Every structure is written in C-alpha cells, then in structure tokens.
Amino acid sequence: MIQSERMTVVRQAKIAHNIFELVLHGELVQAMTPGQFVHVKVSDTLEPLLRRPISIADVNKDNSQFTMIYRAEGRGTEVLSLAATGQQIDVLGPLGHGFPVEAVPAGGTALLVGGGIGVPPLHELAKQLNARGVRTIHVLGFQSENVTFYEQQFSKLGDTYYVTVDGTKGTKGFVTTLLDELKPEFDAFYCCGPLPMLKAMENAYPEKEGYLSFEERMGCGIGACFACVCQTTDKVEKDYVKVCSDGPVFPKGVVQL
Ligand SMILES: Cc1cc2nc3c(=O)[nH]c(=O)nc-3n(C[C@H](O)[C@H](O)[C@H](O)COP(=O)(O)OP(=O)(O)OC[C@H]3O[C@@H](n4cnc5c(N)ncnc54)[C@H](O)[C@@H]3O)c2cc1C
Ligand code: FES
C-alpha cells in the first residue's frame, strides 16, 4: 500500500564524487520490493515543491531501514544531501511495479546490467535473486572511476564487472563492449540505466527474456498527472504507459525506444 511517512535519517555518507548513500528508518520499508522507488520531499518548505523520485537500493525489513543511493546534481538532491542523522524526511512510497524476481527459476542465472545512477536498484534485486537460489552476473557501467560505488557489496553477491567510458576502472567503453567479450550465459536480463543503454540491451538479446527500468520526469508519482507517459510499441491496445504507476520496470518490447 502507498503511504506517506515522516521517516528518520539513520545516517548519510558520501560514497563517491557527488554520490550519497542515505539510510532511512520507518514502517514503509515493510512493503518494499526491488525495482520500486520512493518519492521524496527534500525539504519542509515549499521550495522545491516537487518530490524527487529515487530508487530503493537496499532493504532491511528486520530493522525497518532502507537505503537509497543518489547523485546530488540539482537543487532538490543538493538539499537532500544535507540531511543529518535524526532528521525527518517526508517519503511517499513504495511506488510503482518493480523487477519480477520470479522470472528466473532457482538454479538459473540472471544478467544484471546498470548504468550510473541506474545501478542502485540492481543491488536489492541481486540480493533477492540470490536468496531464491539464482546466480547473478553484474555488469556496471559508469563515466569514470570517481563515480563508481558498491564494488564490495555487488562482488559478494555474484561475478561483478565494471566498465567506464574513460577506461579508469575495468573495461574501457560501454556495457555492450564488455558483454561482446564476455558472451555470458544467462536465462533473463534486468537493466536500469540511460535510454541508449536500455535500447542497446533490447537489441543485443532479441531471443532473451528481459526487463527494463525507465526514468522519466515526474509530478505526482502515483499515476494522476500524466507527466511521465511514454509511447508503447503496441499502438492498438494501449498507446501509452505511465512510468510511475505502470512501471518503472517493463518487460522489453513494451515501451517505444
Ligand atoms: C523511477 C526513478 C528512479 C530514480 N532513481 C534514482 C536513484 O536511485 N538515484 C539517483 O541519483 N537518481 C534517481 N532518479 C533520478 C532522480 O529522480 C533525479 O536525478 C532527480 O529528481 C533530480 O533532482 P534534482 O533536484 O537534483 O534536479 P533538478 O534539475 O533541480 O530537478 C528539477 C526537476 O526535474 C526532475 N528531474 C530531473 N532529472 C530527472 C530525472 N533524471 N528523472 C526524473 N526526474 C528528473 C526533478 O524530479 C525535478 O522535478 C530516478 C528517477 C526515476 C524516475
Ligand atoms: S508522475 Fe504523475 S502520472 Fe506519473
């Protein structure tokens, strides 16, 4: 159920250049599934007015805490990066439809491909796939080494490969550069990142089952304002979907790329 709650900041840390890890405590955590997101009111004032959508990167239901990882790049996320331990933050969520963890059977292999700030939701997904007995391979693409994060956390969960555009960490190039070399064997792929990455993955594995997580500018976050609509490939049955409430995760082939 979607709720709004004043959650408490457990801790916040800078983990890479302009990248922050924020841990919050509250009851909302009990309903979270991987690939969903929360809509965060970054300040108690009217400025900025709109909430900011941020993915769920880690969930700990035992102590009612979850983690988000975000890039402080604009007005709202800069305000958020100043939140200190004990402070309360208004959070709406959990929102949207996440990754189907049951798409790969126990004993199977999932390929998880992420780019930049699309990487965080893959962490909770990898944890939950592992818990179901699914092997995970992680291919994580970034601009440069100084914005990479969570190497230890991902490495504990499965084979982890980094790719950077400038070659400062791992393979030089894009995730597809590495995938061409690796030729991994897997049952289904899950991808979250910029649109060109989603498109490249859809084209690279036409015969595989795949799930793509989309990012769009959002207003309400709950399906009421139509700010986040995307065209579908199926112009007959339904010609658009809302990323916030129908997504953010869609099976490959649904959204027009
Ligand atoms: C479902 C979803 C999950 C996301 N998960 C993460 C995450 O885990 N970590 C992370 O760093 N970022 C994530 N983003 C992107 C994040 O929402 C934007 O970077 C953030 O809203 C920018 O806010 P700002 O105040 O820094 O920028 P500003 O430029 O000041 O924002 C102005 C307006 O544009 C919107 N906006 C700007 N960029 C984006 C964007 N890329 N997507 C959606 N709205 C945007 C803002 O919400 C705001 O309404 C996610 C976006 C979506 C839709
Ligand atoms: S953000 Fe309002 S409908 Fe999606």
Image (cartoon, rainbow, N blue to C red):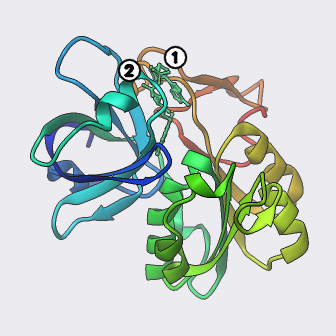
Left or right position of 217 against 232: left
Secondary structure under badge 2? loop
Q: Residues within 10 Å of mark 2 (few under 14, many from 20)?
A: some
Residue where numbered disc 1 is placed: 227
Q: Amino acid at mark 1?
A: Ala
Residue 25 lies, with reference to residue 222, above or below; the image says below
Q: Amino acid at mark 2?
A: Cys
Secondary structure under badge 1? loop
Residue visible at 49% across and 55% down in the picture: 120
For residue 33, which quarter of the picture? Answer: bottom left
For disc 1, does the CB lie below 8 Å from ligand 2? yes
Location of the C terminus (image quadrant)? top right
134 vs 41, nearest the viewer: 41
Residue 135 appears in the picture as rendered: no
217 vs 131, nearest the viewer: 217
For disc 2, does the CB lie below 8 Å from ligand 2? yes
Could you tell me residue 232's position as x and y percent? Answer: 72, 30
Residue 1 lies, with reference to residue 209, above or below; the image says above
Location of the N terminus (image quadrant)? top left
Could you tell me residue 192's position as x and y percent? Answer: 62, 50
Residue visible at 44% across and 58% down in the picture: 34
Residue where numbered disc 2 is placed: 220
Q: Residues within 10 Å of mark 1 (few under 14, many from 20)?
A: some
The reply to whether callout 2 and callout 1 are in contact (CB within 8 Å) is yes
Left or right position of 149 against 6: right
Left or right position of 85 against 230: left
Could you tell me residue 218's position as x and y percent? Answer: 47, 23
